[in-house]
Image (tube, helix red, strand yellow):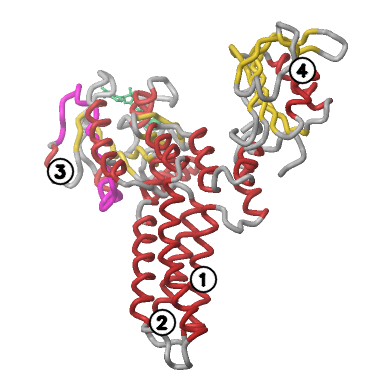
Amino acid sequence: METRTIAAISTPSGTGGISIVRMSGPRSIEIINKIFKSIKGKSIDKDKDNRRMVYGNIVELNGQVVDEVMVNFMKGPYTYTREDVCEINCHGSFVSVKKILNLLLDLGCDLAERGEFTKRAFLNGRIDLSQAEAVLDIINASNELSQKEGINQLKGSLRRKIDSIRKELLEALSRVEYSINFTEDGEDLAPDEIISFMERAKDQIDRLLRTSNKGKIVKDGINTSIVGKPNVGKSSLLNALLDENRAIVTDIPGTTRDLITEYINLGDFTLKINDTAGIRDTDDLVEKIGVDKSIELIENSDLVIAIFDSSRTFDREDEKILDLIQGKNAIVIVNKSDLDAQFDLDIFEDKFPVIRTSMIKEEGLDDLEKEITTMFDTKEINRESVIITNTRHERLLDEAYEDLNQSINDIKIGIPLDACEVDLRRAYEKLGLIIGESVSDEIMDKVFKEFCVGK
Ligand SMILES: Nc1nc2c(ncn2[C@@H]2O[C@H](COP(=O)(O)OP(=O)(O)OP(=O)(O)O)[C@@H](O)[C@H]2O)c(=O)[nH]1
Ligand SMILES: [Mg+2]
Protein backbone atom coordinates (compact mmCIF):
# COMPACT_ATOMS: atom_id res chain seq x y z
CA MET A 1 0.00 0.00 0.00
CA GLU A 2 1.10 3.52 -0.77
CA THR A 3 2.11 5.63 2.17
CA ARG A 4 1.97 8.93 0.32
CA THR A 5 -1.27 10.87 0.28
CA ILE A 6 -1.89 12.59 -3.03
CA ALA A 7 -4.10 15.50 -4.06
CA ALA A 8 -5.16 17.15 -7.31
CA ILE A 9 -7.88 19.19 -8.92
CA SER A 10 -10.15 16.69 -10.68
CA THR A 11 -12.34 19.07 -12.66
CA PRO A 12 -11.23 21.07 -15.73
CA SER A 13 -9.51 24.36 -15.08
CA GLY A 14 -11.61 27.45 -15.59
CA THR A 15 -14.82 28.82 -14.17
CA GLY A 16 -17.80 26.59 -13.40
CA GLY A 17 -20.61 25.91 -10.94
CA ILE A 18 -18.49 23.65 -8.79
CA SER A 19 -15.03 22.16 -8.85
CA ILE A 20 -13.68 19.11 -7.07
CA VAL A 21 -10.35 18.78 -5.31
CA ARG A 22 -9.56 15.15 -4.64
CA MET A 23 -7.26 13.53 -2.13
CA SER A 24 -6.32 9.85 -1.70
CA GLY A 25 -4.12 8.05 0.80
CA PRO A 26 -3.76 7.15 4.47
CA ARG A 27 -3.59 10.74 5.75
CA SER A 28 -6.78 11.93 3.99
CA ILE A 29 -8.93 12.04 7.13
CA GLU A 30 -6.28 13.69 9.27
CA ILE A 31 -5.55 16.37 6.66
CA ILE A 32 -9.16 17.21 5.84
CA ASN A 33 -9.91 17.64 9.54
CA LYS A 34 -7.13 20.21 9.82
CA ILE A 35 -8.80 22.56 7.32
CA PHE A 36 -12.50 21.68 7.38
CA LYS A 37 -15.09 22.94 9.88
CA SER A 38 -18.63 21.63 9.46
CA ILE A 39 -21.47 24.07 10.03
CA LYS A 40 -22.09 22.35 13.36
CA GLY A 41 -18.43 22.84 14.20
CA LYS A 42 -17.64 19.13 14.09
CA SER A 43 -14.79 17.37 12.39
CA ILE A 44 -15.36 14.48 9.99
CA ASP A 45 -15.74 11.06 11.57
CA LYS A 46 -14.09 8.28 9.62
CA ASP A 47 -16.97 5.87 10.25
CA LYS A 48 -20.06 7.96 10.90
CA ASP A 49 -19.39 10.29 7.98
CA ASN A 50 -18.24 7.61 5.58
CA ARG A 51 -19.75 8.40 2.11
CA ARG A 52 -21.77 11.29 3.48
CA MET A 53 -21.70 14.81 2.13
CA VAL A 54 -20.84 17.17 4.96
CA TYR A 55 -21.52 20.88 4.60
CA GLY A 56 -19.09 23.44 6.00
CA ASN A 57 -16.10 25.65 5.32
CA ILE A 58 -12.49 25.21 4.37
CA VAL A 59 -10.61 27.36 6.84
CA GLU A 60 -6.97 28.42 6.75
CA LEU A 61 -4.85 27.71 9.84
CA ASN A 62 -5.20 31.40 10.85
CA GLY A 63 -8.98 31.06 10.87
CA GLN A 64 -9.62 32.76 7.52
CA VAL A 65 -12.47 31.10 5.57
CA VAL A 66 -11.32 30.05 2.11
CA ASP A 67 -14.57 28.70 0.65
CA GLU A 68 -17.92 27.19 1.50
CA VAL A 69 -17.84 23.53 0.53
CA MET A 70 -19.37 20.07 0.65
CA VAL A 71 -16.91 17.39 1.69
CA ASN A 72 -17.37 13.76 0.80
CA PHE A 73 -15.13 11.38 2.72
CA MET A 74 -14.98 7.76 1.52
CA LYS A 75 -13.29 5.16 3.65
CA GLY A 76 -11.12 2.55 1.92
CA PRO A 77 -11.17 -0.11 0.60
CA TYR A 78 -14.52 0.49 -1.17
CA THR A 79 -13.31 3.54 -3.06
CA TYR A 80 -11.93 4.43 -6.47
CA THR A 81 -8.35 3.85 -5.35
CA ARG A 82 -9.14 1.40 -2.53
CA GLU A 83 -7.56 3.98 -0.21
CA ASP A 84 -9.26 6.59 1.94
CA VAL A 85 -10.50 9.19 -0.53
CA CYS A 86 -11.77 12.67 0.20
CA GLU A 87 -13.46 14.91 -2.34
CA ILE A 88 -13.92 18.59 -1.65
CA ASN A 89 -16.72 20.16 -3.70
CA CYS A 90 -16.00 23.88 -3.77
CA HIS A 91 -17.08 26.83 -5.87
CA GLY A 92 -15.85 26.53 -9.40
CA SER A 93 -13.50 29.45 -9.26
CA PHE A 94 -9.90 29.01 -10.21
CA VAL A 95 -8.87 30.91 -7.08
CA SER A 96 -10.80 28.74 -4.57
CA VAL A 97 -9.60 25.54 -6.13
CA LYS A 98 -6.00 26.65 -6.22
CA LYS A 99 -6.12 27.83 -2.61
CA ILE A 100 -7.62 24.57 -1.35
CA LEU A 101 -5.12 22.49 -3.27
CA ASN A 102 -2.25 24.57 -1.89
CA LEU A 103 -3.51 24.04 1.66
CA LEU A 104 -3.51 20.27 1.11
CA LEU A 105 0.01 20.40 -0.29
CA ASP A 106 1.19 22.55 2.62
CA LEU A 107 -0.18 19.93 5.01
CA GLY A 108 1.89 17.18 3.42
CA CYS A 109 0.00 15.90 0.39
CA ASP A 110 1.97 15.23 -2.77
CA LEU A 111 0.62 16.65 -5.99
CA ALA A 112 -0.82 13.66 -7.89
CA GLU A 113 0.86 12.68 -11.12
CA ARG A 114 -1.12 12.19 -14.31
CA GLY A 115 -3.54 9.29 -13.84
CA GLU A 116 -2.20 8.51 -10.38
CA PHE A 117 -5.62 7.93 -8.80
CA THR A 118 -6.42 5.37 -11.50
CA LYS A 119 -2.91 3.93 -11.26
CA ARG A 120 -3.50 3.30 -7.57
CA ALA A 121 -6.81 1.59 -8.39
CA PHE A 122 -4.80 -0.69 -10.68
CA LEU A 123 -1.89 -1.27 -8.29
CA ASN A 124 -4.29 -1.99 -5.45
CA GLY A 125 -6.03 -4.61 -7.58
CA ARG A 126 -9.42 -2.97 -8.00
CA ILE A 127 -9.19 -2.86 -11.79
CA ASP A 128 -6.88 -4.44 -14.35
CA LEU A 129 -4.82 -2.44 -16.82
CA SER A 130 -7.36 -2.79 -19.63
CA GLN A 131 -10.00 -1.32 -17.32
CA ALA A 132 -7.70 1.56 -16.39
CA GLU A 133 -7.25 2.24 -20.09
CA ALA A 134 -11.03 2.12 -20.48
CA VAL A 135 -11.33 4.99 -18.00
CA LEU A 136 -9.22 7.09 -20.35
CA ASP A 137 -11.30 6.02 -23.35
CA ILE A 138 -14.49 7.06 -21.60
CA ILE A 139 -13.07 10.46 -20.68
CA ASN A 140 -11.88 11.03 -24.25
CA ALA A 141 -14.91 9.54 -26.01
CA SER A 142 -16.13 11.77 -28.81
CA ASN A 143 -19.10 9.70 -29.94
CA GLU A 144 -21.65 7.34 -28.46
CA LEU A 145 -20.07 4.14 -29.70
CA SER A 146 -16.64 4.87 -28.28
CA GLN A 147 -18.21 5.82 -24.97
CA LYS A 148 -20.23 2.61 -24.93
CA GLU A 149 -17.21 0.51 -25.82
CA GLY A 150 -15.27 2.21 -23.01
CA ILE A 151 -17.98 1.33 -20.50
CA ASN A 152 -17.98 -2.31 -21.68
CA GLN A 153 -14.27 -2.52 -21.23
CA LEU A 154 -14.43 -0.85 -17.83
CA LYS A 155 -16.89 -3.53 -16.80
CA GLY A 156 -14.24 -6.13 -17.66
CA SER A 157 -15.40 -7.35 -21.08
CA LEU A 158 -11.86 -7.50 -22.46
CA ARG A 159 -10.43 -8.99 -19.30
CA ARG A 160 -12.95 -11.83 -19.41
CA LYS A 161 -12.11 -12.52 -23.05
CA ILE A 162 -8.38 -12.55 -22.35
CA ASP A 163 -8.92 -14.77 -19.30
CA SER A 164 -10.83 -17.30 -21.35
CA ILE A 165 -8.12 -17.41 -24.04
CA ARG A 166 -5.44 -17.80 -21.40
CA LYS A 167 -7.37 -20.67 -19.83
CA GLU A 168 -7.05 -22.62 -23.08
CA LEU A 169 -3.35 -21.86 -23.18
CA LEU A 170 -2.94 -22.92 -19.59
CA GLU A 171 -4.56 -26.28 -20.38
CA ALA A 172 -2.11 -26.69 -23.25
CA LEU A 173 0.84 -25.58 -21.10
CA SER A 174 0.06 -27.99 -18.26
CA ARG A 175 -0.15 -30.91 -20.70
CA VAL A 176 3.11 -29.89 -22.34
CA GLU A 177 4.77 -29.75 -18.94
CA TYR A 178 3.33 -33.07 -17.88
CA SER A 179 4.64 -34.59 -21.03
CA ILE A 180 8.11 -33.10 -20.53
CA ASN A 181 8.38 -34.10 -16.88
CA PHE A 182 6.56 -37.41 -16.55
CA THR A 183 6.92 -39.26 -19.79
CA GLU A 184 9.91 -41.09 -21.17
CA ASP A 185 11.93 -39.53 -23.98
CA GLY A 186 10.14 -39.98 -27.26
CA GLU A 187 6.86 -40.79 -25.52
CA ASP A 188 5.30 -37.34 -25.42
CA LEU A 189 1.55 -37.12 -24.87
CA ALA A 190 -0.45 -37.26 -28.08
CA PRO A 191 -0.07 -33.75 -29.44
CA ASP A 192 -3.56 -33.58 -30.93
CA GLU A 193 -5.21 -32.71 -27.66
CA ILE A 194 -2.62 -30.06 -26.86
CA ILE A 195 -2.97 -28.56 -30.32
CA SER A 196 -6.75 -28.41 -30.06
CA PHE A 197 -6.49 -26.13 -27.02
CA MET A 198 -3.99 -23.96 -28.83
CA GLU A 199 -6.07 -23.77 -32.01
CA ARG A 200 -9.10 -22.68 -30.04
CA ALA A 201 -7.06 -19.90 -28.42
CA LYS A 202 -5.66 -18.89 -31.79
CA ASP A 203 -9.15 -18.60 -33.28
CA GLN A 204 -10.29 -16.38 -30.44
CA ILE A 205 -7.25 -14.12 -30.79
CA ASP A 206 -7.86 -13.93 -34.51
CA ARG A 207 -11.48 -12.92 -33.98
CA LEU A 208 -10.45 -10.19 -31.58
CA LEU A 209 -7.80 -8.91 -33.98
CA ARG A 210 -10.34 -8.69 -36.76
CA THR A 211 -12.36 -6.18 -34.72
CA SER A 212 -9.47 -3.75 -34.47
CA ASN A 213 -10.25 -1.96 -37.75
CA LYS A 214 -13.71 -1.16 -36.49
CA GLY A 215 -12.17 -0.29 -33.17
CA LYS A 216 -10.04 2.41 -34.74
CA ILE A 217 -13.05 3.86 -36.53
CA VAL A 218 -15.03 3.88 -33.30
CA LYS A 219 -12.28 5.56 -31.32
CA ASP A 220 -10.47 7.87 -33.74
CA GLY A 221 -13.35 8.57 -36.09
CA ILE A 222 -13.84 7.74 -39.76
CA ASN A 223 -10.91 9.27 -41.57
CA THR A 224 -12.71 10.96 -44.47
CA SER A 225 -11.32 12.94 -47.39
CA ILE A 226 -13.25 15.24 -49.67
CA VAL A 227 -11.64 15.20 -53.10
CA GLY A 228 -12.42 16.49 -56.57
CA LYS A 229 -11.10 18.83 -59.22
CA PRO A 230 -10.93 22.54 -58.33
CA ASN A 231 -14.09 24.56 -57.79
CA VAL A 232 -16.57 21.69 -57.49
CA GLY A 233 -17.64 22.64 -53.94
CA LYS A 234 -15.38 20.63 -51.61
CA SER A 235 -14.89 23.44 -49.13
CA SER A 236 -18.57 24.29 -49.39
CA LEU A 237 -19.36 20.72 -48.28
CA LEU A 238 -16.99 20.96 -45.32
CA ASN A 239 -18.59 24.24 -44.27
CA ALA A 240 -22.10 22.82 -44.68
CA LEU A 241 -21.31 19.76 -42.55
CA LEU A 242 -19.70 21.92 -39.88
CA ASP A 243 -22.41 24.54 -40.16
CA GLU A 244 -19.82 27.32 -40.14
CA ASN A 245 -17.57 29.13 -42.56
CA ARG A 246 -14.43 27.22 -41.70
CA ALA A 247 -12.81 27.03 -45.16
CA ILE A 248 -12.50 29.85 -47.65
CA VAL A 249 -14.94 29.44 -50.53
CA THR A 250 -14.50 31.45 -53.75
CA ASP A 251 -15.27 30.96 -57.42
CA ILE A 252 -11.54 30.96 -58.15
CA PRO A 253 -10.34 27.41 -58.91
CA GLY A 254 -7.49 26.44 -56.62
CA THR A 255 -8.74 28.32 -53.55
CA THR A 256 -7.87 25.58 -51.05
CA ARG A 257 -4.19 24.73 -51.10
CA ASP A 258 -3.50 23.28 -47.69
CA LEU A 259 -5.24 20.45 -45.91
CA ILE A 260 -8.03 21.45 -43.53
CA THR A 261 -9.02 18.86 -40.91
CA GLU A 262 -12.08 19.06 -38.68
CA TYR A 263 -14.14 16.68 -36.54
CA ILE A 264 -17.87 16.27 -37.05
CA ASN A 265 -20.14 14.23 -34.85
CA LEU A 266 -22.48 11.94 -36.74
CA GLY A 267 -24.50 10.25 -33.99
CA ASP A 268 -22.70 7.02 -33.26
CA PHE A 269 -19.63 8.07 -35.21
CA THR A 270 -17.16 10.87 -35.48
CA LEU A 271 -15.97 11.95 -38.91
CA LYS A 272 -12.43 13.18 -39.10
CA ILE A 273 -12.93 15.13 -42.26
CA ASN A 274 -10.22 16.52 -44.55
CA ASP A 275 -10.89 19.24 -47.09
CA THR A 276 -8.20 19.04 -49.75
CA ALA A 277 -6.75 21.05 -52.60
CA GLY A 278 -8.59 20.47 -55.89
CA ILE A 279 -6.70 17.89 -57.95
CA ARG A 280 -5.42 19.18 -61.31
CA ASP A 281 -2.16 19.51 -63.23
CA THR A 282 -0.55 22.72 -62.17
CA ASP A 283 2.77 24.56 -62.46
CA ASP A 284 2.16 26.46 -59.24
CA LEU A 285 4.60 24.95 -56.72
CA VAL A 286 2.43 25.56 -53.64
CA GLU A 287 -0.69 24.24 -55.28
CA LYS A 288 1.20 21.19 -56.56
CA ILE A 289 2.23 20.23 -53.02
CA GLY A 290 -1.43 20.45 -52.00
CA VAL A 291 -2.50 18.31 -54.95
CA ASP A 292 0.07 15.63 -54.08
CA LYS A 293 -1.21 15.62 -50.50
CA SER A 294 -4.78 15.12 -51.74
CA ILE A 295 -3.74 12.13 -53.85
CA GLU A 296 -1.85 10.63 -50.91
CA LEU A 297 -4.88 11.08 -48.68
CA ILE A 298 -7.11 9.06 -50.97
CA GLU A 299 -4.86 6.10 -50.22
CA ASN A 300 -5.04 6.52 -46.45
CA SER A 301 -8.70 7.31 -45.86
CA ASP A 302 -11.43 5.08 -44.48
CA LEU A 303 -13.87 6.96 -46.67
CA VAL A 304 -13.44 9.15 -49.76
CA ILE A 305 -16.11 11.64 -50.77
CA ALA A 306 -15.48 12.49 -54.43
CA ILE A 307 -17.27 15.59 -55.66
CA PHE A 308 -18.17 16.37 -59.27
CA ASP A 309 -19.73 19.57 -60.60
CA SER A 310 -22.73 18.79 -62.81
CA SER A 311 -22.92 22.33 -64.16
CA ARG A 312 -19.73 21.75 -66.14
CA THR A 313 -18.98 19.00 -68.65
CA PHE A 314 -17.33 15.85 -67.31
CA ASP A 315 -13.72 16.36 -68.39
CA ARG A 316 -10.31 14.71 -68.16
CA GLU A 317 -9.75 16.09 -64.67
CA ASP A 318 -12.97 14.44 -63.50
CA GLU A 319 -11.94 11.20 -65.14
CA LYS A 320 -8.68 11.32 -63.24
CA ILE A 321 -10.57 11.63 -59.95
CA LEU A 322 -12.76 8.70 -60.93
CA ASP A 323 -9.60 6.68 -61.65
CA LEU A 324 -8.05 7.61 -58.33
CA ILE A 325 -11.02 6.38 -56.31
CA GLN A 326 -11.35 3.00 -58.06
CA GLY A 327 -11.48 0.21 -55.49
CA LYS A 328 -11.76 2.69 -52.60
CA ASN A 329 -14.53 3.00 -50.08
CA ALA A 330 -16.06 6.03 -51.78
CA ILE A 331 -19.24 8.03 -52.11
CA VAL A 332 -19.79 10.17 -55.21
CA ILE A 333 -21.40 13.56 -54.84
CA VAL A 334 -22.76 15.32 -57.90
CA ASN A 335 -22.96 18.92 -56.77
CA LYS A 336 -24.57 22.14 -58.01
CA SER A 337 -27.89 20.43 -58.78
CA ASP A 338 -29.47 23.88 -58.70
CA LEU A 339 -27.82 24.58 -62.09
CA ASP A 340 -28.47 22.88 -65.46
CA ALA A 341 -26.82 19.46 -65.66
CA GLN A 342 -24.14 18.96 -68.29
CA PHE A 343 -23.63 15.23 -67.87
CA ASP A 344 -25.53 12.11 -66.97
CA LEU A 345 -25.20 10.08 -63.77
CA ASP A 346 -24.74 6.90 -65.88
CA ILE A 347 -21.05 7.84 -66.01
CA PHE A 348 -20.64 6.28 -62.54
CA GLU A 349 -22.04 2.88 -63.61
CA ASP A 350 -23.35 1.98 -60.13
CA LYS A 351 -19.80 1.55 -58.91
CA PHE A 352 -20.35 3.93 -56.02
CA PRO A 353 -23.34 5.32 -54.18
CA VAL A 354 -24.20 8.59 -55.95
CA ILE A 355 -25.82 11.54 -54.21
CA ARG A 356 -27.03 14.74 -55.83
CA THR A 357 -26.47 17.86 -53.79
CA SER A 358 -26.67 21.60 -53.90
CA MET A 359 -24.47 23.24 -51.33
CA ILE A 360 -26.02 26.58 -52.14
CA LYS A 361 -29.52 25.30 -51.36
CA GLU A 362 -28.24 22.93 -48.69
CA GLU A 363 -29.87 19.96 -50.38
CA GLY A 364 -28.72 16.35 -50.23
CA LEU A 365 -26.73 16.55 -46.99
CA ASP A 366 -29.17 14.30 -45.13
CA ASP A 367 -28.78 11.69 -47.86
CA LEU A 368 -25.03 11.87 -47.45
CA GLU A 369 -25.22 11.33 -43.70
CA LYS A 370 -27.62 8.43 -44.20
CA GLU A 371 -25.29 6.83 -46.74
CA ILE A 372 -22.32 7.10 -44.36
CA THR A 373 -24.17 5.52 -41.45
CA THR A 374 -25.32 2.65 -43.69
CA MET A 375 -21.79 2.16 -44.94
CA PHE A 376 -20.30 1.98 -41.47
CA ASP A 377 -22.95 -0.30 -40.10
CA THR A 378 -23.19 0.37 -36.40
CA LYS A 379 -25.36 -2.71 -35.93
CA GLU A 380 -22.46 -4.91 -36.89
CA ILE A 381 -20.21 -3.15 -34.41
CA ASN A 382 -22.88 -3.44 -31.73
CA ARG A 383 -23.06 -7.18 -32.31
CA GLU A 384 -19.43 -7.68 -31.32
CA SER A 385 -19.17 -8.17 -27.60
CA VAL A 386 -15.60 -6.89 -27.46
CA ILE A 387 -13.90 -4.53 -29.87
CA ILE A 388 -10.18 -3.84 -29.81
CA THR A 389 -9.81 -0.07 -29.79
CA ASN A 390 -6.36 0.24 -28.28
CA THR A 391 -3.14 -0.13 -30.29
CA ARG A 392 -1.24 -1.50 -27.30
CA HIS A 393 -3.75 -4.35 -27.06
CA GLU A 394 -3.70 -4.89 -30.79
CA ARG A 395 0.09 -5.18 -30.87
CA LEU A 396 0.17 -7.66 -27.99
CA LEU A 397 -2.58 -9.78 -29.54
CA ASP A 398 -0.67 -9.76 -32.79
CA GLU A 399 2.52 -10.92 -31.10
CA ALA A 400 0.71 -13.59 -29.09
CA TYR A 401 -0.87 -14.84 -32.29
CA GLU A 402 2.52 -15.15 -33.98
CA ASP A 403 4.08 -16.98 -31.01
CA LEU A 404 1.16 -19.35 -30.78
CA ASN A 405 1.18 -20.04 -34.48
CA GLN A 406 4.90 -20.79 -34.35
CA SER A 407 4.41 -23.16 -31.44
CA ILE A 408 1.55 -25.02 -33.16
CA ASN A 409 3.58 -25.44 -36.35
CA ASP A 410 6.58 -26.69 -34.38
CA ILE A 411 4.52 -29.31 -32.56
CA LYS A 412 2.94 -30.41 -35.85
CA ILE A 413 6.29 -31.05 -37.49
CA GLY A 414 7.45 -33.07 -34.50
CA ILE A 415 9.84 -30.69 -32.77
CA PRO A 416 10.26 -31.85 -29.13
CA LEU A 417 7.69 -30.34 -26.79
CA ASP A 418 10.19 -28.63 -24.50
CA ALA A 419 11.32 -26.54 -27.46
CA CYS A 420 7.74 -25.66 -28.39
CA GLU A 421 6.90 -24.65 -24.86
CA VAL A 422 8.89 -21.40 -25.05
CA ASP A 423 6.65 -19.78 -27.67
CA LEU A 424 3.51 -21.12 -26.05
CA ARG A 425 4.49 -19.61 -22.71
CA ARG A 426 5.42 -16.33 -24.38
CA ALA A 427 1.95 -16.12 -25.99
CA TYR A 428 0.42 -16.66 -22.56
CA GLU A 429 2.53 -13.87 -21.06
CA LYS A 430 1.84 -11.41 -23.88
CA LEU A 431 -1.89 -11.79 -23.26
CA GLY A 432 -1.21 -11.20 -19.57
CA LEU A 433 0.37 -7.85 -20.38
CA ILE A 434 -2.95 -6.65 -21.84
CA ILE A 435 -4.60 -6.94 -18.46
CA GLY A 436 -1.45 -5.72 -16.71
CA GLU A 437 -0.03 -8.95 -15.36
CA SER A 438 3.77 -8.64 -14.70
CA VAL A 439 3.69 -5.36 -16.55
CA SER A 440 6.89 -3.29 -16.35
CA ASP A 441 7.07 0.18 -14.79
CA GLU A 442 7.96 1.50 -18.19
CA ILE A 443 4.74 0.27 -19.80
CA MET A 444 2.73 1.46 -16.83
CA ASP A 445 4.22 4.94 -17.06
CA LYS A 446 3.40 5.02 -20.73
CA VAL A 447 -0.23 4.10 -20.11
CA PHE A 448 -0.83 6.59 -17.31
CA LYS A 449 1.08 9.42 -18.98
CA GLU A 450 -1.92 9.72 -21.32
CA PHE A 451 -4.21 10.64 -18.42
CA CYS A 452 -4.86 14.08 -17.05
CA VAL A 453 -3.88 15.10 -13.54
CA GLY A 454 -6.73 14.43 -11.13
CA LYS A 455 -8.01 11.17 -12.66
N1 LIG B 1 -24.59 27.12 -57.85
C1 LIG B 1 -23.86 26.47 -56.98
N2 LIG B 1 -22.64 26.91 -56.63
C2 LIG B 1 -21.90 26.23 -55.73
C3 LIG B 1 -22.43 25.06 -55.12
N3 LIG B 1 -21.47 24.60 -54.27
C4 LIG B 1 -20.41 25.45 -54.37
N4 LIG B 1 -20.68 26.43 -55.24
C5 LIG B 1 -19.81 27.53 -55.63
O1 LIG B 1 -18.67 26.99 -56.31
C6 LIG B 1 -17.51 27.75 -56.03
C7 LIG B 1 -16.40 26.86 -55.51
O2 LIG B 1 -16.74 26.34 -54.24
P1 LIG B 1 -15.65 25.79 -53.24
O3 LIG B 1 -16.38 25.17 -52.13
O4 LIG B 1 -14.65 26.82 -52.94
O5 LIG B 1 -15.00 24.69 -54.18
P2 LIG B 1 -13.69 23.81 -53.89
O6 LIG B 1 -13.96 22.50 -54.53
O7 LIG B 1 -13.35 23.83 -52.47
O8 LIG B 1 -12.61 24.59 -54.76
P3 LIG B 1 -11.00 24.60 -54.60
O9 LIG B 1 -10.67 24.84 -53.17
O10 LIG B 1 -10.61 25.70 -55.48
O11 LIG B 1 -10.52 23.29 -55.09
C8 LIG B 1 -17.95 28.83 -55.04
O12 LIG B 1 -18.21 30.01 -55.74
C9 LIG B 1 -19.22 28.27 -54.44
O13 LIG B 1 -20.09 29.27 -53.99
C10 LIG B 1 -23.74 24.63 -55.47
O14 LIG B 1 -24.27 23.63 -55.00
N5 LIG B 1 -24.39 25.36 -56.39
MG1 LIG C 1 -11.69 24.44 -51.46
Residue to which mark 1 is pinned: 425
- Nearer to us: label 1 or label 4: 1
Place of residue 164 in the rendered image (x, y in percent of width and height, measured from the top left)? 41, 58
Say which of 77 and 134 sits in front: 77
* Measured Cα–Cα span from mark 1 to mark 2: 14 Å
* Measured Cα–Cα span from mark 3 to mark 4: 68 Å
Amino acid type, callout 1? Arg
Would you identify the image quadrant in which residue 24 lies? top right
* Measured Cα–Cα span from mark 2 to mark 4: 65 Å
Amino acid type, callout 3? Ile
Most distant residue in the right direction: 62
Vertical side of 449 occupied by 201: above or below: below
Residue range (magenta): 322-343
| Residue 273 visible in the displayed image | no
Residue to which mark 2 is pinned: 411
Quarter in which the C terminus is drawn: top right
Say which of 96 and 241 sits in front: 96
